[in-house]
Image: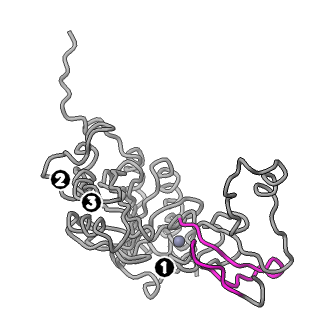
Amino acid sequence: MLLIECPHCGPRDETEYQYGGEAHVAYPEDPSQLSDKEWAEYLFYRNNPKGLIAERWAHAVGCRRWFNVVRDTVTYEIKAVYRIGEPKPEIGGVK
Amino acid sequence: MAEQLLTDTTALRRSPLAHLAQQMHEQTVTGERGVALREIPFLTMVGIRVAPGTPAADAVAAAAGMPLPTGHGRVTGTAGATAILWIGPDEFLLVGPEGVGPAEIGPAGSDLRAAGSDDAGTAAGLARALGTEPGQAVDLSANRTTLELSGPSARAVLEKSCHLDLHPRAFAVGTAVATTLGPVQVLLWRTEELTWRIMPRASFAEYTARWLLDGMTEFASPEVP
Ligand SMILES: [Zn+2]
Protein backbone atom coordinates (compact mmCIF):
# COMPACT_ATOMS: atom_id res chain seq x y z
CA MET A 1 0.00 0.00 0.00
CA LEU A 2 1.41 3.38 -1.00
CA LEU A 3 1.18 6.24 1.45
CA ILE A 4 0.53 9.28 -0.72
CA GLU A 5 0.81 12.81 0.60
CA CYS A 6 -2.17 14.89 -0.54
CA PRO A 7 -0.97 18.51 -0.81
CA HIS A 8 -4.13 19.58 1.01
CA CYS A 9 -4.80 16.77 3.52
CA GLY A 10 -1.43 15.17 4.23
CA PRO A 11 -0.54 11.47 4.04
CA ARG A 12 -3.38 9.04 3.27
CA ASP A 13 -3.57 5.46 2.07
CA GLU A 14 -3.41 4.78 -1.65
CA THR A 15 -6.99 3.45 -1.50
CA GLU A 16 -8.24 7.00 -0.90
CA TYR A 17 -6.96 8.10 -4.30
CA GLN A 18 -7.81 7.74 -7.96
CA TYR A 19 -5.07 7.45 -10.55
CA GLY A 20 -5.15 9.82 -13.52
CA GLY A 21 -2.29 8.78 -15.78
CA GLU A 22 0.67 10.82 -16.96
CA ALA A 23 0.73 14.51 -16.03
CA HIS A 24 1.58 17.49 -18.24
CA VAL A 25 0.06 16.10 -21.44
CA ALA A 26 -1.06 19.36 -23.02
CA TYR A 27 -4.38 19.55 -24.87
CA PRO A 28 -3.66 20.32 -28.54
CA GLU A 29 -3.95 23.98 -29.55
CA ASP A 30 -6.30 23.15 -32.39
CA PRO A 31 -7.42 19.52 -32.41
CA SER A 32 -9.16 19.91 -35.78
CA GLN A 33 -5.77 20.52 -37.42
CA LEU A 34 -4.34 17.20 -36.20
CA SER A 35 -3.97 14.14 -38.34
CA ASP A 36 -5.56 10.95 -37.04
CA LYS A 37 -2.11 9.75 -36.06
CA GLU A 38 -1.38 12.92 -34.06
CA TRP A 39 -4.78 12.77 -32.37
CA ALA A 40 -4.26 9.12 -31.44
CA GLU A 41 -0.87 10.01 -30.02
CA TYR A 42 -2.42 12.75 -27.89
CA LEU A 43 -5.17 10.43 -26.65
CA PHE A 44 -3.38 7.16 -26.12
CA TYR A 45 0.41 7.44 -26.27
CA ARG A 46 2.16 7.90 -22.96
CA ASN A 47 5.69 7.66 -21.66
CA ASN A 48 6.44 4.38 -19.97
CA PRO A 49 9.79 5.01 -18.34
CA LYS A 50 11.73 2.73 -16.08
CA GLY A 51 12.32 5.35 -13.43
CA LEU A 52 10.72 8.70 -12.67
CA ILE A 53 7.37 9.71 -14.12
CA ALA A 54 5.08 12.64 -13.33
CA GLU A 55 1.49 11.52 -12.96
CA ARG A 56 -1.89 12.81 -11.80
CA TRP A 57 -3.71 11.59 -8.73
CA ALA A 58 -7.03 12.69 -7.21
CA HIS A 59 -7.83 12.50 -3.52
CA ALA A 60 -11.14 10.90 -4.38
CA VAL A 61 -12.62 10.25 -0.92
CA GLY A 62 -11.02 13.24 0.80
CA CYS A 63 -10.75 16.76 -0.59
CA ARG A 64 -11.49 15.51 -4.14
CA ARG A 65 -8.67 17.62 -5.63
CA TRP A 66 -6.32 16.60 -8.41
CA PHE A 67 -2.59 17.03 -7.94
CA ASN A 68 0.67 15.79 -9.41
CA VAL A 69 3.10 13.20 -8.15
CA VAL A 70 6.60 12.25 -9.30
CA ARG A 71 6.96 8.51 -8.74
CA ASP A 72 9.71 6.02 -9.43
CA THR A 73 8.18 3.18 -11.44
CA VAL A 74 10.88 0.77 -10.24
CA THR A 75 10.73 1.33 -6.48
CA TYR A 76 7.28 2.97 -6.29
CA GLU A 77 8.96 5.66 -4.20
CA ILE A 78 7.18 9.02 -4.40
CA LYS A 79 9.80 11.71 -4.96
CA ALA A 80 7.59 14.81 -5.04
CA VAL A 81 4.01 15.99 -4.71
CA TYR A 82 2.89 19.33 -6.17
CA ARG A 83 -0.35 21.11 -6.90
CA ILE A 84 -1.97 21.50 -10.28
CA GLY A 85 -0.49 24.56 -11.97
CA GLU A 86 2.82 24.32 -10.15
CA PRO A 87 5.88 23.47 -12.25
CA LYS A 88 7.29 19.98 -12.17
CA PRO A 89 10.19 19.90 -9.71
CA GLU A 90 13.58 18.88 -11.08
CA ILE A 91 14.68 15.66 -9.49
CA GLY A 92 17.86 13.76 -10.22
CA GLY A 93 18.34 15.42 -13.60
CA VAL A 94 14.98 14.23 -14.90
CA LYS A 95 13.11 17.02 -16.64
CA MET B 1 -64.32 14.45 -2.73
CA ALA B 2 -60.69 14.28 -1.84
CA GLU B 3 -59.39 17.15 0.18
CA GLN B 4 -55.83 18.22 0.67
CA LEU B 5 -55.52 18.09 4.44
CA LEU B 6 -51.80 17.46 4.69
CA THR B 7 -50.06 20.72 5.39
CA ASP B 8 -47.00 19.52 7.29
CA THR B 9 -45.04 17.19 5.05
CA THR B 10 -42.36 16.61 7.70
CA ALA B 11 -44.69 13.91 9.08
CA LEU B 12 -43.99 11.91 5.91
CA ARG B 13 -40.21 12.06 6.21
CA ARG B 14 -38.30 8.87 6.91
CA SER B 15 -34.69 9.21 7.91
CA PRO B 16 -32.30 6.72 6.29
CA LEU B 17 -31.86 4.83 9.59
CA ALA B 18 -35.31 5.14 11.14
CA HIS B 19 -35.86 1.40 10.70
CA LEU B 20 -32.69 0.62 12.70
CA ALA B 21 -33.34 3.02 15.59
CA GLN B 22 -34.67 0.27 17.84
CA GLN B 23 -31.83 -2.12 17.05
CA MET B 24 -29.20 0.55 17.61
CA HIS B 25 -30.79 1.37 20.95
CA GLU B 26 -30.91 -2.30 22.00
CA GLN B 27 -27.25 -2.86 21.20
CA THR B 28 -26.10 -0.09 23.51
CA VAL B 29 -23.26 -1.31 25.70
CA THR B 30 -22.95 0.30 29.12
CA GLY B 31 -20.16 0.33 31.65
CA GLU B 32 -16.40 0.54 31.34
CA ARG B 33 -16.41 -0.86 27.81
CA GLY B 34 -19.54 1.03 26.84
CA VAL B 35 -20.39 2.17 23.35
CA ALA B 36 -23.64 3.45 21.86
CA LEU B 37 -24.84 4.24 18.36
CA ARG B 38 -27.72 6.47 17.32
CA GLU B 39 -28.82 8.44 14.33
CA ILE B 40 -29.13 12.21 14.48
CA PRO B 41 -31.53 12.57 11.55
CA PHE B 42 -32.37 15.54 9.36
CA LEU B 43 -29.48 17.84 10.23
CA THR B 44 -29.24 20.77 7.88
CA MET B 45 -26.22 20.58 5.61
CA VAL B 46 -25.18 23.28 3.19
CA GLY B 47 -22.42 22.75 0.66
CA ILE B 48 -20.37 25.92 0.26
CA ARG B 49 -17.92 26.64 -2.54
CA VAL B 50 -15.93 29.87 -2.19
CA ALA B 51 -12.26 30.73 -2.56
CA PRO B 52 -10.80 31.74 0.83
CA GLY B 53 -9.69 35.34 1.14
CA THR B 54 -12.18 36.64 -1.42
CA PRO B 55 -15.21 38.92 -0.89
CA ALA B 56 -17.35 35.82 -1.52
CA ALA B 57 -15.77 33.99 1.41
CA ASP B 58 -16.12 37.03 3.65
CA ALA B 59 -19.81 37.38 2.73
CA VAL B 60 -20.55 33.73 3.45
CA ALA B 61 -18.66 33.80 6.75
CA ALA B 62 -20.55 36.92 7.83
CA ALA B 63 -23.90 35.35 6.94
CA ALA B 64 -23.01 32.13 8.74
CA GLY B 65 -21.87 34.08 11.78
CA MET B 66 -18.50 32.35 11.99
CA PRO B 67 -15.24 32.26 10.05
CA LEU B 68 -14.60 29.56 7.49
CA PRO B 69 -12.18 26.87 8.68
CA THR B 70 -8.68 27.43 7.34
CA GLY B 71 -7.39 23.98 6.58
CA HIS B 72 -7.59 20.21 6.63
CA GLY B 73 -9.40 18.76 9.64
CA ARG B 74 -10.56 22.11 10.97
CA VAL B 75 -14.06 23.04 12.11
CA THR B 76 -15.50 26.39 13.19
CA GLY B 77 -18.66 26.89 15.25
CA THR B 78 -19.99 24.17 17.54
CA ALA B 79 -21.38 20.71 16.89
CA GLY B 80 -24.34 21.36 19.21
CA ALA B 81 -25.51 24.34 17.16
CA THR B 82 -24.06 25.29 13.77
CA ALA B 83 -20.59 24.39 12.56
CA ILE B 84 -18.63 24.64 9.32
CA LEU B 85 -16.36 21.77 8.30
CA TRP B 86 -13.38 22.09 5.97
CA ILE B 87 -13.88 19.77 3.00
CA GLY B 88 -11.36 21.07 0.47
CA PRO B 89 -9.31 24.18 -0.27
CA ASP B 90 -12.41 26.01 -1.56
CA GLU B 91 -15.13 23.71 -0.26
CA PHE B 92 -16.92 23.68 3.09
CA LEU B 93 -19.93 22.03 4.69
CA LEU B 94 -22.19 23.89 7.07
CA VAL B 95 -23.94 21.54 9.51
CA GLY B 96 -26.78 22.95 11.56
CA PRO B 97 -29.88 21.92 13.44
CA GLU B 98 -32.86 20.36 11.73
CA GLY B 99 -35.47 22.59 10.23
CA VAL B 100 -33.61 25.25 8.31
CA GLY B 101 -33.17 23.12 5.23
CA PRO B 102 -34.94 22.29 2.03
CA ALA B 103 -38.29 23.83 2.93
CA GLU B 104 -36.64 27.23 2.85
CA ILE B 105 -35.09 26.69 -0.53
CA GLY B 106 -38.09 26.66 -2.82
CA PRO B 107 -38.64 24.66 -5.99
CA ALA B 108 -35.83 23.93 -8.37
CA GLY B 109 -34.93 26.91 -10.46
CA SER B 110 -36.44 29.47 -8.14
CA ASP B 111 -34.32 32.45 -7.25
CA LEU B 112 -32.62 31.53 -3.99
CA ARG B 113 -31.40 35.08 -3.61
CA ALA B 114 -34.95 36.40 -3.38
CA ALA B 115 -35.79 34.30 -0.34
CA GLY B 116 -37.07 35.76 2.92
CA SER B 117 -34.82 37.45 5.42
CA ASP B 118 -35.20 35.04 8.33
CA ASP B 119 -32.90 32.44 6.84
CA ALA B 120 -29.43 33.05 8.25
CA GLY B 121 -27.46 29.82 8.12
CA THR B 122 -29.62 28.24 5.44
CA ALA B 123 -28.56 27.58 1.88
CA ALA B 124 -30.92 30.33 0.77
CA GLY B 125 -29.51 32.82 3.24
CA LEU B 126 -25.92 32.01 2.35
CA ALA B 127 -26.62 32.12 -1.37
CA ARG B 128 -28.29 35.50 -0.95
CA ALA B 129 -25.30 36.76 1.06
CA LEU B 130 -23.07 35.64 -1.78
CA GLY B 131 -24.94 37.96 -4.15
CA THR B 132 -23.18 38.12 -7.49
CA GLU B 133 -19.78 37.06 -6.12
CA PRO B 134 -18.48 33.80 -7.60
CA GLY B 135 -19.40 30.89 -5.37
CA GLN B 136 -22.13 28.51 -4.36
CA ALA B 137 -24.30 27.56 -1.38
CA VAL B 138 -26.47 24.53 -1.97
CA ASP B 139 -28.70 22.57 0.39
CA LEU B 140 -27.27 19.05 0.78
CA SER B 141 -29.28 17.99 3.83
CA ALA B 142 -30.56 14.83 2.15
CA ASN B 143 -27.11 13.80 0.93
CA ARG B 144 -25.76 12.42 4.19
CA THR B 145 -27.26 11.30 7.46
CA THR B 146 -25.44 11.52 10.77
CA LEU B 147 -24.53 8.65 13.08
CA GLU B 148 -23.29 9.36 16.57
CA LEU B 149 -20.97 6.81 18.12
CA SER B 150 -20.12 7.44 21.76
CA GLY B 151 -18.62 5.82 24.82
CA PRO B 152 -15.26 4.61 26.11
CA SER B 153 -15.01 1.97 23.36
CA ALA B 154 -16.09 4.23 20.49
CA ARG B 155 -12.55 4.87 19.26
CA ALA B 156 -11.74 1.14 19.38
CA VAL B 157 -14.80 0.43 17.22
CA LEU B 158 -13.73 3.04 14.66
CA GLU B 159 -10.12 1.88 14.63
CA LYS B 160 -11.21 -1.51 13.34
CA SER B 161 -11.87 -0.04 9.93
CA CYS B 162 -10.51 3.50 9.79
CA HIS B 163 -6.90 3.84 8.67
CA LEU B 164 -6.33 7.27 10.20
CA ASP B 165 -4.64 7.81 13.54
CA LEU B 166 -7.56 8.57 15.86
CA HIS B 167 -5.48 9.03 19.00
CA PRO B 168 -6.20 12.43 20.61
CA ARG B 169 -2.65 13.63 19.87
CA ALA B 170 -3.38 13.26 16.14
CA PHE B 171 -7.17 13.67 16.09
CA ALA B 172 -8.25 16.19 18.72
CA VAL B 173 -11.81 17.07 19.68
CA GLY B 174 -13.18 19.38 17.01
CA THR B 175 -11.42 17.66 14.12
CA ALA B 176 -13.38 16.52 11.06
CA VAL B 177 -12.05 14.79 7.96
CA ALA B 178 -13.31 13.06 4.85
CA THR B 179 -12.04 9.50 4.69
CA THR B 180 -13.26 5.93 4.50
CA LEU B 181 -14.74 3.69 7.17
CA GLY B 182 -14.38 0.18 5.83
CA PRO B 183 -15.27 0.69 2.17
CA VAL B 184 -17.62 3.62 2.78
CA GLN B 185 -16.75 7.26 2.18
CA VAL B 186 -17.71 9.24 5.28
CA LEU B 187 -17.10 12.47 7.09
CA LEU B 188 -15.62 11.63 10.49
CA TRP B 189 -15.96 14.31 13.14
CA ARG B 190 -14.81 14.09 16.74
CA THR B 191 -17.29 16.28 18.64
CA GLU B 192 -16.25 15.29 22.17
CA GLU B 193 -13.53 13.21 23.78
CA LEU B 194 -15.66 10.05 23.57
CA THR B 195 -18.18 11.12 20.92
CA TRP B 196 -17.88 10.89 17.15
CA ARG B 197 -20.12 11.81 14.27
CA ILE B 198 -19.97 9.60 11.21
CA MET B 199 -21.70 10.98 8.16
CA PRO B 200 -22.19 8.53 5.28
CA ARG B 201 -24.26 9.26 2.21
CA ALA B 202 -27.86 8.20 2.73
CA SER B 203 -27.61 5.15 0.47
CA PHE B 204 -24.62 3.87 2.49
CA ALA B 205 -26.22 4.61 5.87
CA GLU B 206 -27.69 1.18 6.54
CA TYR B 207 -24.44 -0.56 5.61
CA THR B 208 -22.45 1.81 7.83
CA ALA B 209 -24.81 1.41 10.79
CA ARG B 210 -24.75 -2.39 10.57
CA TRP B 211 -20.99 -2.30 10.11
CA LEU B 212 -20.61 -0.29 13.33
CA LEU B 213 -23.12 -2.44 15.22
CA ASP B 214 -21.07 -5.48 14.25
CA GLY B 215 -17.93 -3.75 15.51
CA MET B 216 -19.67 -2.91 18.81
CA THR B 217 -20.82 -6.46 19.57
CA GLU B 218 -17.63 -7.70 21.22
CA PHE B 219 -17.72 -4.94 23.82
CA ALA B 220 -20.93 -6.35 25.31
CA SER B 221 -18.87 -9.30 26.59
CA PRO B 222 -15.98 -9.21 29.07
CA GLU B 223 -12.57 -8.58 27.55
CA VAL B 224 -10.78 -11.74 26.48
CA PRO B 225 -7.57 -11.80 28.49
ZN1 LIG C 1 -6.87 15.73 0.01
What is the residue that sits farthest to the top in this orientation?
A: B1
Mark 2, residues whose alpha carbon is within 10 Å: few (<14), some, or many (≥20)?
A: some
| Residue that carries the numbered disc 1 in the rendered image | B166
Q: Position of residue B125 (x, y in %)?
A: 21, 54
Determine the image quadrant of residue A54: bottom right
Marks 1 and 3: same chain? Answer: yes
The residue range painted magenta reads A65-90
What is the residue that sits farthest to the bottom in this orientation?
A: A92
| Residue that carries the numbered disc 2 in the rendered image | B119
Callout 3: chain: B
Question: Residue at point 60% right, 66% down?
Answer: A58
Name the foreground residue: B180 vs B151. B180
Question: Residue at point 49% right, 70% down?
Answer: B219
Name the foreground residue: B70 vs B220. B70
B61 w.r.t. B147: above or below: below
Q: Position of residue B158 (x, y in %)?
A: 50, 70
Type of residue at label 1?
Leu
Q: Is residue B86 magenta?
A: no
B38 w.r.t. B222: above or below: above
Nearest to the eye among marks 2 and 3: give it: 2
B215 w.r.t. B71: above or below: above
Callout 1: chain: B
Confirm if mark 3 falls within 8 A of ligand 1: no
Type of residue at label 3?
Gly
Sooner in the amino-acid sequence: mark 1 or mark 2? 2
